[in-house]
Image: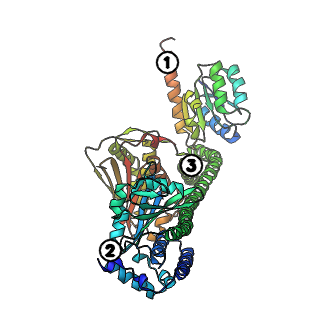
């Protein structure tokens, strides 16, 4: 089973993403900010992180950088209301950039795409 | 030349004391006239009239040369003097009949410089200031001098043959024009008509005259400089004012953009929640449930709000075009394909007139796509009950031109200058940003935008982009 960590400060959206993605068959854990996410990635070693950018405590870009420095294998999808971060070169390190929409299909298809490319990468070695 | 030997004034009875009085009167009139004029040409003329008017001073001809600082030369500017003894006697008779003050008062600029012969002579004087020409040396000495038998007295410089040739004589008086240490020019006077010798008294009067003339010339020069500076100042002020207005406008736009972006972002997160949960509920609701349709309404209305937010955010962030070579015809095709649904809903026929061999254009595809979408959207909105949408592309020299034409309602002329103002809209549902974004995209590409609209017949917008914009065009 694929485990996904959803990092999102808005409680309603946390609930929406958890419910919607669990319905897709993923195991979902949630974190409220970048700092929590950092601790949870170490503890839970998820297969994928979905990261909001604007959050209190530690923003998503910095959290992503720290996560990638420690666990450089875990893919990260940035999921944000802002398109401006697309120009931020830190954002280039992410595996995907999705702009939040009430239609979750773009996010879901990006998740499938990232997971598929990861498993394809790992296929030759194991 | 028998009449030339007699000056008309010589016929007048008079003593040297009367002459002196007449000279002072002339000096007085000339001084008064000079005080009233700010035109340099008029001042020069008054000086020349004074030098040639009097019974005592009364030179036949007078010439003014002025320092031209830009050309670093002493240049002839204006002269006065009759062509012949006959003309001289006419002028001098008239001078005696008319009061000099009145004459100067009535002076009209168009009457200046009409003595053709002497003005031809004076215009040929052009002496480099860094030469050791005797006239330059006399000017710098600030002392009057008299050319007499090929020598300047008292300076002792030889008289150059060119000056003698120009003046047509070897005897003439030279008075430097100067103020403090500043050399202004020379006043040259002679008696080429009467051949009367130039005496010491005349030289002294000429010197006094030259002083008066120098003050007047300096005044008119200062006045001229002042006017130029005022004009420059006014131009600078004007530029400053218009810059300030532009700046204010830009600031207002940027504030509006920032506020719009802030608001849009704040709205976006709750919209995702509302719409996301509504979609969940909708999926779990059987289609025959009466609530199904109501949930659909929530979902589609939220989707509409999200599109509006996107449009606002698109406007506030669009600054940095990422330019790449682009097949514009393919872009037009793809825009039209993506909008098929709206096009069919409005029962609009699409006609594409795309130039077959259009070279690729260097532009930001995403931005131009957005601009085209906005124009097509507007065109569709203008044709609520169907019509024809014509999209054209063509190369015009260095420029690419894309036209988007509808057969719709047209734009009322009273709205023309408001079209590109943010948040201005005539539609019942619109952000008023569509054309603002179009014009922003055009600006970003150093392009231009024009439109042609006839009420009842339709509107056509033309986008013009350089095929290969200058590199700075792709900067924010």
Q: Position of residue B141 (x, y in %)?
A: 53, 55
Label 1, secondary structure: give it.
helix
> Is A68 in front, or is B120?
B120
Badge 2: chain ID: B
Quote the CA–CA distance across marks 2 and 3: 78 Å
Q: Which mark is residue A121?
A: 1
Q: Which numbered disc, 2 or 3, marks the residue closer to the eye? A: 2
Tell me, yes or no, whether dots 2 and 1 are on the same chain: no
Residue at 59% in and 30% down? A90
In the visual, does B358 lie left or right of B268?
left
Q: Which mark is residue B316?
A: 3
Q: Position of residue B113 (x, y in %)?
A: 39, 72
Q: Which numbered disc, 2 or 1, marks the residue closer to the eye? A: 2
Residue at 35% in and 75% down? B82
- Where does label 2 land, which residue? B83
Quadrant of residue B470 in the image? top left
Tell me, yes or no, whether dots 2 and 3 are on the same chain: yes
Earlier in the chain: of badge 2 and badge 3, it is: 2
């Amino acid at each position: 089973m694929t485990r996904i960590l959803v990092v999102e400060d808005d409680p309603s959206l946390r609930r929406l993403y958890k419910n919607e993605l669990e319905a897709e068959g993923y195991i979902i854990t949630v974190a409220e900010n970048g700092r929590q996410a950092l601790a949870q990635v170490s503890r839970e070693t998820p297969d994928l992180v979905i990261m909001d950018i604007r959050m209190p405590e530690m923003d998503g870009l910095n959290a992503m950088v720290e996560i990638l420095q420690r666990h450089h294998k875990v893919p990260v999808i940035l999921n944000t209301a802002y398109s401006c971060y697309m120009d931020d070169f830190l954002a280039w390190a992410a595996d995907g950039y999705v702009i939040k929409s009430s239609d979750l299909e773009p996010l879901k298809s990006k998740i499938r795409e990232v997971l598929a490319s990861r498993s394809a990468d790992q296929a030759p070695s194991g | 030349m028998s009449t030339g030997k007699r000056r008309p004034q010589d016929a007048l009875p008079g003593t040297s004391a009367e002459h002196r009085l007449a000279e002072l009167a002339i000096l007085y009139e000339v001084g008064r006239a000079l005080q009233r004029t700010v035109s340099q040409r008029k001042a020069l003329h008054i000086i020349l009239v004074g030098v040639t008017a009097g019974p005592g001073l009364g030179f036949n001809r007078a010439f003014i040369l002025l320092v031209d600082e830009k050309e670093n030369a002493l240049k002839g500017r204006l002269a006065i003097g009759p062509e012949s003894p006959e003309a001289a006697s006419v002028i001098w008779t008239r001078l005696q009949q008319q009061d000099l003050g009145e004459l100067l008062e009535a002076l009209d600029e168009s009457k200046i410089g009409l003595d053709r012969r002497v003005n031809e002579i004076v215009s040929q004087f052009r002496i480099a200031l860094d030469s050791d020409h005797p006239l330059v040396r006399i000017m710098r000495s600030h002392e009057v001098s008299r050319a007499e038998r090929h020598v300047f007295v008292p300076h002792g410089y030889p008289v150059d043959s060119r000056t003698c040739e120009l003046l047509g004589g070897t005897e003439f008086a030279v008075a430097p024009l100067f103020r403090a240490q500043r050399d202004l020019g020379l006043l040259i006077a002679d008696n080429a008509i009467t051949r009367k010798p130039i005496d010491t008294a005349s030289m002294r009067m000429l010197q006094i005259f030259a002083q008066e003339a120098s003050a007047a010339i300096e005044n008119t020069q200062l006045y001229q400089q002042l006017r130029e500076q005022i004009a420059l100042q006014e131009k600078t002020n004007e530029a400053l004012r218009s810059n300030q207005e532009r700046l204010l406008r830009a600031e207002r736009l940027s504030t509006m953009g920032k506020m719009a972006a802030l608001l849009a972002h704040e709205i976006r997160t709750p919209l995702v929640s509302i719409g996301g949960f509504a979609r969940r509920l909708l999926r779990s609701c059987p289609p025959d449930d009466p609530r199904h349709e109501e949930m659909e309404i929530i979902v589609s209305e939220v989707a509409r709000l999200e599109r509006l937010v996107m449009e606002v955010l698109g406007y506030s962030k669009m600054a940095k075009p990422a330019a790449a070579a682009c097949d514009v015809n393919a872009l037009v095709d793809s825009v039209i394909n993506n909008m098929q649904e709206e096009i069919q809903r409005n029962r609009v026929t699409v006609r594409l007139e795309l130039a077959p061999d259009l070279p690729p254009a260097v532009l930001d595809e995403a931005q131009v796509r957005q601009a085209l979408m906005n124009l097509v959207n507007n065109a569709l909105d203008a044709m609520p009950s169907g019509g024809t949408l014509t999209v054209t592309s063509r190369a015009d020299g260095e420029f690419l031109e894309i036209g988007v034409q509808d057969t719709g309602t047209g734009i009322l002329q009273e709205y023309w200058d408001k079209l590109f103002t943010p948040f201005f809209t005539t539609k019942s549902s619109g952000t008023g940003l569509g054309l603002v974004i179009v014009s922003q995209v055009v600006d970003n590409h150093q392009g231009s935008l024009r439109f042609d609209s006839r009420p009842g017949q339709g509107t056509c917008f033309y986008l013009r982009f350089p095929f290969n914009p200058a590199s700075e065009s792709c900067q924010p």
